Amino acid sequence: MISSSSRPGAASHAQVITPGATLGVLGSGQLGRMFTIAARRMGYRVHTFSPDQDTPTGQVADREVTAPYEDLDALRAFAREVAVVTFEFENVPSDAVHALDYIVPVRPSGAALYTAQQRGREKAFLLERGFPTVPFARASTFEELLDGVARIGTPAVIKSAAFGYDGKGQHKITRLAEAEHVWNELEGREALVEKFVSLQAEISVIAARGLDGAIAEYPPFENRHSNHILDVTTAPALIPAPLAARAREIARAILEALDYVGVLCVEFFVTTDGELLVNELAPRPHNSGHLTFDAAITSQFEQQVRSICGLPLGSTELLKPAAMANLLGDLWADGEPNWAAACRHPDVKLHLYGKTQPRPGRKMGHLTATGRTVQEAQDTVVAARDALLS
Ligand code: ADP
Ligand code: MG
């Protein structure tokens, strides 16, 4: 679905960053790698900036800059060589974003990033704008944490407000007395207390907003986690149509409220009572959208390229029902997985990120399958992943 809201400052032809230009990406993981593949396919060059070397993004980019995010001189030098900067990793210090901002357009903006990169600010923004969330409390001191848990009630989840991903920095508690132990683990970092809700499903809506204010979102995808890490995504989510419509509407309203340019993922909880709640925002493409590479007219990465370059957005239509299974480092425990066995399924696509160290829990790649039905796609992708261990 694409719509256009005419507003002052809409992109003019002159603002388009045309193929041949160099795009900058902060961060160097698999999201940057797939962004780079999409950008290069369209004729752009890509430079990546991160503290690491021989990275998933760097391996496919035109240039890999290795420096800490705190090195403002290195960031400025990076910015001078690119036409626009985007992110594949949002935990970049605001100073870094400001340093770039003076030199080159940064999309999404530093302000949007500032809101979405820290759970406390993100939840406060959602509450203030009237978007539905789980009941929560922010805590910077142990006393505030105790107050928060008392107010929210147990069971509750205590999350570190910054730098969390794949369930890292999260603790479920069932009694107020457990809060002290969690506070000690957080070592003084700001925390967020959330009511632990009983979930019927988790869904995500990935949406893009262009420079002209046009928004395009994919239908909701359904996500299943294992050990707090995304395990399998299926698309489209098999949920009632009004719920899907409501989720899309909320995602669009969030992009508007943030005056966002780029790709953003809204993760939702569907509670056992059928309530739709926003869980968190990711100000970039998302793991649950990887299947768009093989199953949609426009991938989330091409959409990122289009939106940050001021090009019109592409169609978010799914070509076929699809499923994605993550490949974690655990699959390497007994040696190299059996790639030929997985590829024996003709409807399966293999994506590997070029990481050399297969640590347990580390995202090494994914498989995508399409099918006549969501169930068929899911069965195929799970069977293909199982075959890796044959
Ligand atoms: P991350 O940044 O690690 O993805 P999330 O806040 O999305 O952090 O939490 C990871 C997963 O943990 C969620 O997808 C969900 O399965 C579970 N979870 C998190 N918060 C809650 C909650 N308040 N109630 C129930 N389950 C939760
Ligand atoms: Mg999450």
Image (cartoon, grey):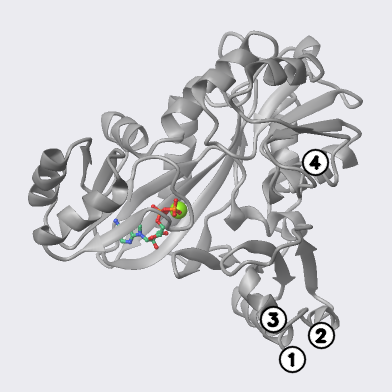
Q: Secondary structure at mark 2?
A: helix
Q: Amino acid at mark 2?
A: Ala
Please name the residue that numbered disc 3 is placed on.
380
Q: Amino acid at mark 1?
A: Ser
Q: Quadrant of the N terminus?
A: top right
Q: With 39 as the anchor, is 282 left or right in this view? A: left
Q: Residues within 10 Å of mark 1 (few under 14, many from 20)?
A: few
Cβ–Cβ under 8 Å for marks 1 and 2: yes
Q: Residues within 10 Å of mark 4 (few under 14, many from 20)?
A: many
Quick check: can you spot residue 107? Answer: yes
**Chain-order first, disc 2 or disc 3:** 2
Q: In the rendered view, would you say 1 is above or below 366?
A: above
Give me the C-alpha separation between circle 3 and circle 4. 28 Å
Give the percent coordinates (x, y) of residue 259.
50, 22
Please name the residue that numbered disc 4 is placed on.
36
Q: Secondary structure at mark 3?
A: helix
Of 326 and 10, nearer the camera is 326
Look at 76% across and 21% down and name the residue there: 78
